[in-house]
Image (cartoon, rainbow, N blue to C red):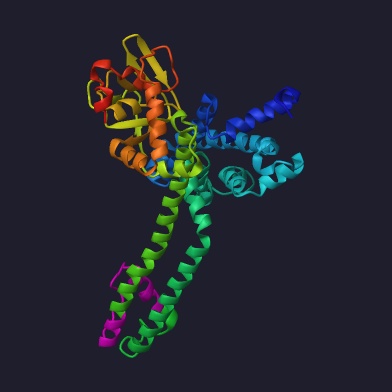
């Protein structure tokens, strides 16, 4: 159904869903809403932490209560609006409105939203201070996962690797159990109180394998010391296992995101528009990313050309004699000066915060050597753009970088 066919109430509900669940992409209003909610989460969690100190509670108690009431009011409105706009969520597409809202109510994010506002409402019916519900109030910290892509990535990694993490936990428990049993057998006579049973020995095994080593229980027999040494070494191995699983999975998650961005960027760049999937995958191996703030100088006039650039996000401004020219996402610059080995004849600055994909000269040379047809294609595109056309804005700065005096004769050109 088109937007024109929607009723005013349906359009309003869709707008609410966009503001709350778009992630702030492409909308200043959505970014403001998400920023305000994140600020309230941080302030409310900070107030709970500071309120646990009696001196701070006595001095700033009214401020803490104001922060709490404002946060709960805002989170309550957000919770109600999310329930109302649930039918527009892509996860519940195809469901009837009542079914979509019911499915949302039992989702993990909705349960966190409910826990975030529950304490103050429970205090109305239960004669207890809010501090008794301290853990419930601190649970709103997890609301940040909804607004932070990085935190969402971590949760996604933990969910994807839950079986491997569970398996490593089982193995770790087995090591603790085995070492505790061995220590109980060899140290029971020497220290009947400390190692009186396997459960009692597990305290020693856990702190030893975790490499904490409080020193409250130590082996006294030679056999016990051997077991302790083995436990310490096993601790390094076992604790490194889940860390390695999470680190590898997180790196793969980031790589997948970068892969999608890079693939789509390269595929739509005019220079590579005719390449097939295998050629795009090949060139992606050589690209490196760089993020720069607004105002940063990307290319300086007069410097040698060492790289060509693709704009993955943001805009750059080319300072041409005829006036500045802006290039945006999906556009590129620098390949002709790179191929012809000329110097830059224009400054390029980041007009907004930008993310660039950079292909160095050596990597371009290797890539074209391995793919001669693509190399000839790049040469053909470069040759077609060798004339200076300041009014053409097809995404290639290097039209302004070519000075005919800098181009060697054709027969001696590399």
Q: Residue at x 31, y 10 (%)?
A: 321
Specify whether residue 286 is painted magenta: no
Q: In this view, does 381 lie above or below 264?
A: above
Q: Where is residue 15 in the image (x, y as percent from the top left)?
A: 64, 28
In the displayed structure image, the side of residue 226 where residue 274 appears, left or right: right
Asked whether 11 or 328 is in front, the reply is 328
Observer able to see residue 353: no
- Residue 291 lies in quadrant: top left
- Residue range highlighted in magenta: 201-227
Q: Which residue is drawn at 33% across and 13% down?
A: 320
Asked whether 407 or 2 is in front, the reply is 407
- Residue 59 lies in quadrant: top left
Q: Is residue 63 above or below residue 387?
A: below
Observer able to see residue 253: yes
Asked whether 52 or 316 is in front, the reply is 316
Residue ranking furthest to the top: 322
Q: Where is residue 119 in the image (x, y as percent from the top left)?
A: 57, 46
In the displayed structure image, the side of residue 271 where residue 160 appears, left or right: right
Specify whether residue 213 is painted magenta: yes
Q: Position of residue 53 (x, y in %)?
A: 39, 46
Q: Quadrant of the C terminus?
A: top left
- Residue 279 lies in quadrant: top left
In the displayed structure image, the side of residue 358 where residue 123 appears, left or right: right
Q: In which quarter of the image is the N terminus?
A: top right
């Amino acid at each position: 159904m088109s937007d024109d066919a929607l009723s005013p109430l349906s359009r309003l509900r869709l707008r609410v869903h966009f503001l709350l669940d778009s992630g702030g992409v492409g909308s200043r209003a959505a970014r403001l809403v998400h920023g305000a909610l994140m600020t309230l989460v941080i302030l409310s969690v900070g107030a709970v932490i500071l309120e646990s100190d009696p001196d701070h509670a006595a001095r700033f108690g009214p401020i803490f209560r104001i922060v709490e009431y404002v946060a709960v009011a805002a989170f309550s409105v957000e919770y109600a609006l999310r329930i109302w706009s649930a039918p527009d969520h892509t996860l519940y597409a195809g469901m009837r409105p009542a079914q979509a809202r019911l499915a949302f109510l039992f989702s993990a994010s909705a349960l966190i939203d409910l826990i975030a506002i529950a304490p103050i409402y429970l205090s109305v019916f239960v004669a207890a201070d809010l501090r008794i519900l301290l853990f419930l109030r601190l649970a709103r910290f997890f609301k940040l996962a909804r607004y932070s892509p990085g935190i969402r990535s971590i949760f996604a990694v933990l969910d994807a690797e839950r079986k491997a993490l569970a398996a490593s936990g089982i193995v770790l428990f087995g090591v603790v159990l085995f070492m505790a049993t061995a220590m109980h057998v060899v140290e029971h006579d020497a220290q009947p109180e400390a190692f009186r049973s396997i459960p009692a020995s597990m305290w020693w095994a856990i702190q030893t394998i975790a490499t904490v080593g409080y020193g409250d229980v130590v082996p006294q027999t030679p056999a016990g010391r051997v077991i302790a040494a083995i436990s310490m070494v096993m601790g390094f191995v076992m604790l490194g296992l889940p860390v390695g699983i999470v680190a590898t999975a997180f790196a793969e998650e980031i790589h997948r995101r970068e892969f999608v961005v890079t693939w789509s960027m390269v595929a739509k760049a005019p220079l590579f528009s005719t390449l097939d999937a295998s050629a795009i995958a090949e060139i992606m191996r050589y690209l490196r990313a760089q993020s720069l703030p607004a105002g940063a100088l990307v290319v300086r006039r007069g410097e040698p050309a060492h790289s060509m650039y693709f704009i993955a996000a943001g805009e750059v401004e080319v300072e041409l004699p005829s006036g500045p020219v802006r290039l945006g996402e999906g556009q590129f610059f620098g390949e002709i000066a790179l191929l012809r080995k000329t110097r830059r004849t224009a400054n390029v600055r980041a007009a907004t915060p930008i993310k660039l994909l950079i292909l160095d000269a050596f990597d371009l040379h290797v890539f074209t050597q391995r793919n001669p047809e693509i190399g000839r294609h790049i040469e053909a595109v470069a040759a077609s753009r060798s004339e200076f056309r300041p009014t053409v804005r097809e995404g290639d700065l290097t039209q302004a970088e070519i000075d005919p005096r800098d181009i060697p004769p054709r027969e001696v050109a590399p």
